Amino acid sequence: MKPNTTGATRTVTAVSRDVCVVGAGYVGLTAAACLSHLGHRVHCVESDPDRLATLVAGGIPIHEPGLDELVVAGRAAGRLDFHAEAGPALAGAQIALLCVGTPPQPSGEPDLGFLAAAARQVARAANGDLVVVVKSTVPPGSCEALELICAEEAAPGILIRVASSPEFLRESRAVADFLAPDRVVVGTDHVDVSDLVASLYPPGSAVVRCDRRGAELVKYAANTFLAIKISFANEVAALCEALGTDATTVLAGVGLDSRIGTAFLRPGPGYGGSCLPKDVDGFRSVGDALSAETRLADAAVAQNADARQAVVSKLEVVLSGVRGKRVAVLGLAFKGGTDDTRDSPGRHIARQLVTGGAEVHCYDPLAWPDDTCGTRERTLAEAVVDADAVVVTTLAEELSSIEPGELASKMRGRIVFDAAGALDITSCTAAGLTLYGVGRGAPTEFHAIVWSPLRWAHPVGAPAS
Ligand SMILES: NC(=O)c1ccc[n+]([C@@H]2O[C@H](COP(=O)([O-])OP(=O)(O)OC[C@H]3O[C@@H](n4cnc5c(N)ncnc54)[C@H](O)[C@@H]3O)[C@@H](O)[C@H]2O)c1
């Protein structure tokens, strides 16, 4: 990576531009709405006919706080429109942002087919020189490959330069993140391209300028680090369970060190979603391709698989088997505040329980899973009625504000497995519920080895007094 340290402090004048955005998902639609809010004229291309029809009709196909207001305002101001084809969206635009999916393949490498198709599409439709900015998450070297594809497809005389500017927004706070990013990363070897890309973002954003491979790796490395942090928290939580102490408090004690930070240092059912699992696998694939070890990333993946499985295994123990038991799974999105169920721990847990013979009734305030997760109930109350056990998998607001007494009055059994740490142990106990969690309290039935502090008082091999 060749960071341009002088460039990092360059100031770029904000100019309103015509911008083409390809893909209207979590990243593309957020970018399109926010860029129009910042004064740019944004022309968004979406290939899914249903999603496009929703957008054209004034609807919003995803749940993201604040997004609908920005889309409505952008359209009303004539600064945001939606198209099926790149041609009309590129008219007048010098710059096109590619925001299409890069889903995982069984090999762990991302499928770059959608991105290559999008690059072809804009290159063929370009009627002047164009800067293509890859916002999708890709392995290092992808932008170089996409530039070759664009050169093959573009009309003679048209120069298409491809830059990397990965997106770091978090679902459920995507608009706020886009409008006030921790940093913006711009990867290109051309100063004019770097200035053009940086000028799109909110004025005053911290911009890290580097080459394309470096920018692409920043995204993979950031997500891999977050996954490692979550897995580390779950590793500490397993020790806390064995020791009979509380992981939330221990991890707060760790994370309040300003060198460490509390974010992502919570015990839970493992990480999920459309990004972390895919990007950690992508990071490992890069290591494989370069014959470089990725031991920490490998360990995070193994730990995460255990963290998900542990919830089901512990339920098997406390319910003396799940077969025939009625279990409510609350939380099917990969976290609270989103409707995104891609690779979510809640779905994984619900499916495992269904496979194990449990009667699963599931609920999420925003998400609707496929029908492999049992029966999707319309309300939380319907999901928990007559349940032998309730599992909570996310910190969705509605789940964190469950009233334990009300829950107890609806359930048949007493067991609540709060994998997300959403509920208060004291009030659950007071309501007659038995609360299990990740790294909480001392459920000794999970541990064959009972820890003895005497181990330290009488070290192995010490002479008996
Ligand atoms: N979701 C996140 O939180 C997040 C955050 C940062 C980065 N990313 C990365 O950004 C990329 C996009 O993620 P997403 O979650 O927005 O995906 P998404 O699946 O929600 O959206 C992708 C959209 O692109 C559309 N599309 C695909 N090919 C197209 C084409 N040729 N022309 C027009 N539209 C096309 C799809 O129909 C879909 O609507 C991925 O690489 C992802 O890893 C995602």
Image (tube, rainbow, N blue to C red):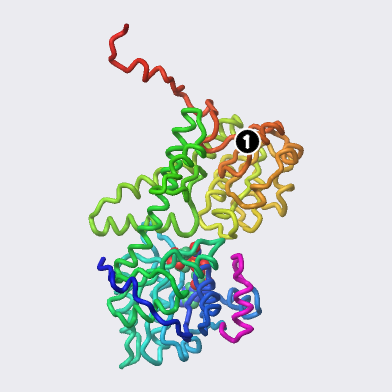
Q: Nearer the viewer, residue 368 or 43?
A: 43
- Magenta span of residues: 60-80
Q: Position of residue 308 (x, y in %)?
A: 49, 44
Q: Secondary structure at mark 1?
A: helix
Q: Is residue 434 above or below residue 288?
A: above
Provide the residue designation for mark 1: 425
Q: Position of residue 271 (x, y in %)?
A: 48, 50
Q: Which residue: 46% across, 35% down?
A: 238
Q: Nearer the viewer, residue 408 or 358?
A: 408
Q: Position of residue 84 (x, y in %)?
A: 53, 82
Dot 1, how many residues are within 10 Å of its Cα: few (below 14), some (14-19), or many (20+)?
some
Horizontal arrangement in the rendering, residue 186 relative to residue 170 (left or right): left
Horizontal arrangement in the rendering, residue 129 relative to residue 450 (left or right): left
Q: Nearer the viewer, residue 355 or 285?
A: 285
The quarter in which the C terminus is drawn is top left
Q: Is residue 406 above or below residue 277?
A: above
Q: Which residue: 62% across, 54% down?
A: 371
Residue 54 counted in the magenta span? no
Horizontal arrangement in the rendering, residue 39 relative to residue 254 (left or right): right
Q: Quadrant of residue 435?
A: top right
- Number of marks in the image? 1
Q: Confirm if mark 1 falls within 8 A of ligand 1.
A: no
Q: Is residue 313 above or below residue 184?
A: above
Query: The residue under label 1 is which amino acid type?
Result: Ile
Q: Position of residue 5 (x, y in %)?
A: 28, 69
